[in-house]
Image: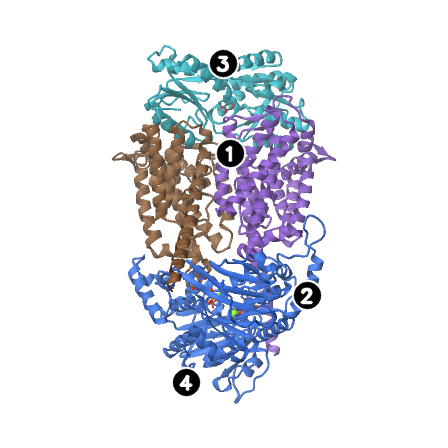
Chain colours: A brown, B purple, C cyan, D blue
Amino acid sequence: MSKKDLGLLILILVVGAVVTAINPRFLSAINLANTSNLVALFGILSIGQAFVIITGGIELSVGSLIALLGTLFIDFIAVRELDWPLAFVVIIALGAVIGFVHGWLITRLKLQPFVVTLCGLLIYRGVARFYTADGTAGFAFGQNFPTLEFLTAGRSYGLPNSFIALIVIAIVMWVVLHRSVFGRYLYAIGKNEEAAKYSGIRTGRIIIAAYVICGVLTALSAIYFAMYTRSISPASHGQFYELYAIAAAVLGGFSLRGGEGSLVGVVLGTVLLQELQNLVNLLGIPSSLNFAVMGGVILIGVLVDQQWGVFRARRRMMEATRQNVAGAPAE
Amino acid sequence: MSKKDLGLLILILVVGAVVTAINPRFLSAINLANTSNLVALFGILSIGQAFVIITGGIELSVGSLIALLGTLFIDFIAVRELDWPLAFVVIIALGAVIGFVHGWLITRLKLQPFVVTLCGLLIYRGVARFYTADGTAGFAFGQNFPTLEFLTAGRSYGLPNSFIALIVIAIVMWVVLHRSVFGRYLYAIGKNEEAAKYSGIRTGRIIIAAYVICGVLTALSAIYFAMYTRSISPASHGQFYELYAIAAAVLGGFSLRGGEGSLVGVVLGTVLLQELQNLVNLLGIPSSLNFAVMGGVILIGVLVDQQWGVFRARRRMMEATRQNVAGAPAE
Amino acid sequence: VTRADDKPTLAFVVNGASDFWKAAEAGVKKAQGELPDYNLELKYPEQSSVAIQQRLMDDLVTAGVKGIMVSAVDPKTSTDGLNKIASETALFTTDSDAPQTKRVAYIGSSNVDAGKQAAEIAKKAMPNGGKCLGFVGLLGADNAKERIQGMKDGLAGSKIELVDVRGDDIDQARAKKNVEDALVASPDITCMVGFYSYNTPRIYEALRDAGKLGQITVVGFDDDPITLGGVKEGTVAATVVQQPFEWAYQGMKLMAAYLKGDKSGIPANNLIIIPTKIIGKDDVDAYAANLKAMAGK
Amino acid sequence: MTSTDTTQPIAAPFLSLEAVRKTYPGVVALDRFSMEVRPGEVIGLVGENGAGKSTLMKILGGVTRPDSGTITVDGAAHDGLTVEQSIGSGIAFVHQELNLFENLDVAANIFFGREPLRAGPLRLVDRARLRDMVAPLLKRVGANFSADAPVASLSLAQQQMVEIAKALSIKARLVILDEPTSSLPIAETEKLLDVIKGLKAEGISVIFISHRLHEIERVADRVVVLRDGTLAGTLAKVEINHDEMVRLMIGRMLKEREKAGEAARAPGSVALSADAIRTSTYPDRPVSIELRRAEILGLAGLVGSGRTELARVLFGIDERLAGSVTLDGKPLHVGSAADAVANGIFLVPEDRKLTGILLDLSIAQNITLPNLPAHARRSLVSTGAELATAEKQKKNLGIKAPSVLTRTGTLSGGNQQKVVLAKWLAMNPKVMILDEPTRGIDIGAKAEIYGLMRALADAGVAVLMISSDMEEVIGVSDRIAVMHEGQISGILDKDDFSQENVLLLAVGKKPKLLQAAGGVE
Ligand SMILES: Nc1ncnc2c1ncn2[C@@H]1O[C@H](COP(=O)(O)OP(=O)(O)OP(=O)(O)O)[C@@H](O)[C@H]1O
Ligand SMILES: Nc1ncnc2c1ncn2[C@@H]1O[C@H](COP(=O)(O)OP(=O)(O)OP(=O)(O)O)[C@@H](O)[C@H]1O
Ligand SMILES: O[C@@H]1[C@@H](O)[C@H](O)OC[C@H]1O
Ligand SMILES: [Mg+2]
Ligand SMILES: [Mg+2]
């Protein structure tokens, strides 16, 4: 675990301790379960985003995709009565295809990631709204899918199953990002795509793969979100989730310029964001200030991180100078 | 006018012609007045955004700022009964201060523009909501400000005064961007900040100035928007307007990597976006598809622009090759 | 502030931020004066979406809230989520009912009846018939659907038709733009209906800007000051007012009594309907005065 | 501050440095360094890669502040200069790395930061006056491009000329040129040396940094030699000669330069053959070339003659518009650099920092990047294997760095170039293309790189060396191909090697051959 990640962990623990002191229910089983469920949902999303950010890209269509894929998923199983495993596979595949198309537009047609995914943001939500004719996709009364519901919204040993899924995904993705050849390529491309290409790396394919991973994880979390709300009004469902995901990655030490960040960081970033949301409600802070608190904490976090870096560099410099000065007369 | 701008203009005219053919009301005085009013409101915003984008930055807090400053403006004149010119000056000054703070955080504390303004996006809307206690800022029935209303929502010679304001602002800003030393520095910084610094330019100040310009123009359009809706519910007012502004700039040929784009382009980009929105309504396309159409057109526009460049380069090459092949036997 | 060791808390959770709920806030305040043993609070979700409202309620439950009265964003499809809340606190609904959940009772308007009253206004204002266009916040929300249905039922057999309803996601700029676009795209429209509290004022302003005030019949809902001003002026035919103050005031007291074991206030059908009223030109002054008096309390 | 005992120079120094010191984390880039610059004097500044030359110039340009020491300009002492102070004192600076704005035109670049203004508070650029001011400057550097050409459309060498014109545009009293000729071919270099002489005649001082010592010999009045950040010595005009400079630079005499392949070798069989290929820069000029095993083929030519473009096409970076390529007699499809690498065709690119290496990665990570799967088990990177390869290459090539985990960006140019070579040498090349492999590299490292190229050829690799350094092309190659306006204008065999012949071919004329050679159109 890097120093940055450790700092974030400590911050999370300190905030938790303070909140607990004010309202001990923070540590109640039900609150922890609720919060860890949301951490899982947003965490899966943010890990996907992290893979794109590391290449120096960005994926802005995440929120709209959550709305579109969630709508389709519920529609498939509730209205069209597809078997849910089939619907599940179809949705994940759709996520992969959309990720592929984004990656393809970006690498082959050389469009800017911001532009491509901004268009995605506009298009997918529009399509979802059109699909439901600006209505809602939801289950009928008494429509139940016991296995699916257990897997998505159920618990095992007191832990939400979604959270267990996050842990598994995080471990797998940690290996992929930090230990695999593919992960190394991602970092290299994020640092300097041109140079990576000159080293014989098929940068286009790697970048496309990053968008596909993002698409798949987004599709997965779209299903989780759909099963969490059990009803989707596409006009607002998932709005601004891309900002959550980006914020989690940034808090976790990712640079939007690419080539920097760790998987542990993005997970911790998600935890901190959810903790903050939880805190606002638990401490009775007016909920209108919810986002303001989030924004404030991100800003302070990034500032402290930045200033801490400057401070350390300066101190190292000072020391080096002092040593030199001390050494000079002896010569 | 550059080729790119000309292409955009032709696209606007062609779309307009097609829409008119289907529904002649497109050219009715009332529709043109409505649309040009919105072009003005979004245009002022987008010009501000363009100044930031040209430096390689981005300003995501625009929508939230429109909500916060609009709320304050209405509150000042409707509830606190400040003279409107005073309130006007205060709001514009606030916009400048916020722009300054963003620029300062970005240049002095070296934070990423995306991060700083993302936090702004979260914070300002939160503050606005808190300020109105999640209610609405609006005028009482019959509360009138004839001069202010004339200037913001009135018309002269059939043209909305807001549109006249846009034209004046666009001309001034065109001179600033394309003819002044400051404008030249903006382009230089956007392309290569390091080199600009080596040339003795105080890049920090220039970048801050760009954010201040963006803040001021955003504040101005916040006042226009406030006088247009005459009532602001901060939870939703101005949501996603930053995306409009960015989209207009991108359509107008700006690169998010900085250093590219023209003022005419961003204005034409705004016109196209508003024309599209108008088209959706006039042609009876379900309004849920409004954003999808917008996203689709931006994507196609950017793609055509990109592919057109590739195509021309290739054709040039082919021609050269052909000539040579034809010439070879003669040798 | 909600504290674990404090007095029990009762929360009133609304469906979205608008001034409509300021009256409910006043009602909560009045009830608070009479219920010193409880903490009463009114909460706005960040956005009018199921997920955000659900999360807000989950957190309230965690914080130890004893009773929640909610205007669910989408009651028909969030049955399970609401049931989860109902299993841990006393859950009441308001504004939009959720009859299929385990909620204790609904207190609010009959939205179908309110729609029918809107039809009455239209019929009275346009004896020769006409074409109406509606505007609403959340097209997918239940109270909107019921009002639209109620109005259609009420118009059945008359020469008036409700041709379409446009949504705006509770974005006021879009609400106004919708009206402007309608004026351009469908010039044959003779009447406009504002189904949510802020829609009527947006219609009023767009008509005023276009110089069409008085030429198009406006049917309103709720009692935004601009709506009432329009009614008084004669440019708004009349408005159907709801009583959010009473929902909140009576609702909170009912909930407190229920928690203390007194279930006498809950009728057999679990519906406590607070009637909606048509306010026309003649009643508007008295109504506005009464409104002022209530807010003062 | 101690005053020097040396006798006062004839003219008072324009600028002097006293005991200047500059450290970077872990490196003392400059230490106890003192020197003087007198009006109208041309100072040659030489030193190995990383000796501190650029650091010194950055201090004079106001880009970096020294840790200690004094800089005296016109009698006023400073602890350090700012960019404004530096420009204000008449110091003009051509950086080693180009500092142009691609999105602006030539004129805007030349007077960037000093635009002529129109009257009025808006600070509008007076564009007519700007054009008038630029024209004579472009003429002076012998530019073959116009003042309103976007810089993005110029070649590297043309951009270098813009940089020089920019330095001249300042009413400068001291012009600092940090390796201005590293990407200039012969003709342009000549022009630049003339420019320097012209400056001197006008009483303007020049500090001229170059690794091409013969250029220094030709124009310098005095040579200052840096070694490891300290002053190794100063040579007066009469003392300036190649071997003495080298001795001071590296602290010993260099072995007699390898006159590689003096015994004429039997050329190997053809490894890579390109037949009538067309590139996007010169689509109307088909190029055919054969690279033979165990041979170094030098590729010479004037600026923009299309050598780099040819290399990029062979390596799969740029699209091949027409023609065919075979490797070992079999048709070869190269659609991307990855394809080239898979076939053992490697490129050491011209622009080291942008395309050669990843500055932010460690030496080890750079070396294994093209061959990572071979350092992985089941797609997971094995750090052990990676470090082993890196250590081996570091030792073989003599890369000077604290460890293989050092960030590549902190290495000197020569060592960075060795890292680029190391990554390919670790992988058994069949065809090795080197584009300006010794650009900006000191004489010691140069010799090592020549040795490496020769060793590759001896091991049977086909080597293509693109170079604008005449001495190098003639000294190292087994055969020389010369390009002129996108085509091979001729191929010289060893016996026909001469500066004159290379130059004649480079400008599209017939060489003076001992015997008839093929390939000339
Ligand atoms: N920004 C920096 N950070 C850390 N070390 C640096 C930095 N700049 C230079 N150095 C180090 O300072 C030393 C001197 O570098 P400098 O660039 O002055 O060498 P040089 O003589 O110009 O070499 P070359 O001939 O390769 O250009 C080198 O060891 C280099 O690695
Ligand atoms: N990456 C590039 N992008 C655009 N144009 C290029 C690029 N590289 C080279 N060119 C253009 O192609 C032409 C041929 O240049 P090339 O670099 O192949 O020649 P060269 O003989 O290697 O000369 P140089 O000394 O400039 O490298 C030049 O005029 C240059 O403008
Ligand atoms: O649900 C509310 C509705 O009843 C009222 O008419 O308008 C505002 C809405 O929030
Ligand atoms: Mg150097
Ligand atoms: Mg070259």
Between tags 3 and 1, which lies in front?
1
Q: Residue A16: where, in percent of width, then height?
A: 34, 34
Between tags 4 and 3, which lies in front?
4
Q: Which mark is residue B125?
A: 1
> CA–CA distance between discs 3 and 2?
86 Å
> CA–CA distance between discs 2 and 1?
54 Å
Please tell me which residue lies in front, B255 or C74.
Answer: B255
Q: Which mark is residue D135?
A: 2
Please tell me which residue lies in front, A6 or B293.
Answer: A6
Q: How many C-alpha atoms fall within 10 Å of the one at disc 3: few (<14), some, or many (≥20)?
A: some
> CA–CA distance between discs 4 and 3?
107 Å
Q: Residue furthest left?
A: A157
Q: Residue furthest bottom?
A: D514
Q: Residue A230: where, in percent of width, then height?
A: 38, 32
Between tags 3 and 2, which lies in front?
2
Mark 4 residue type: Arg
Mark 1 residue type: Arg
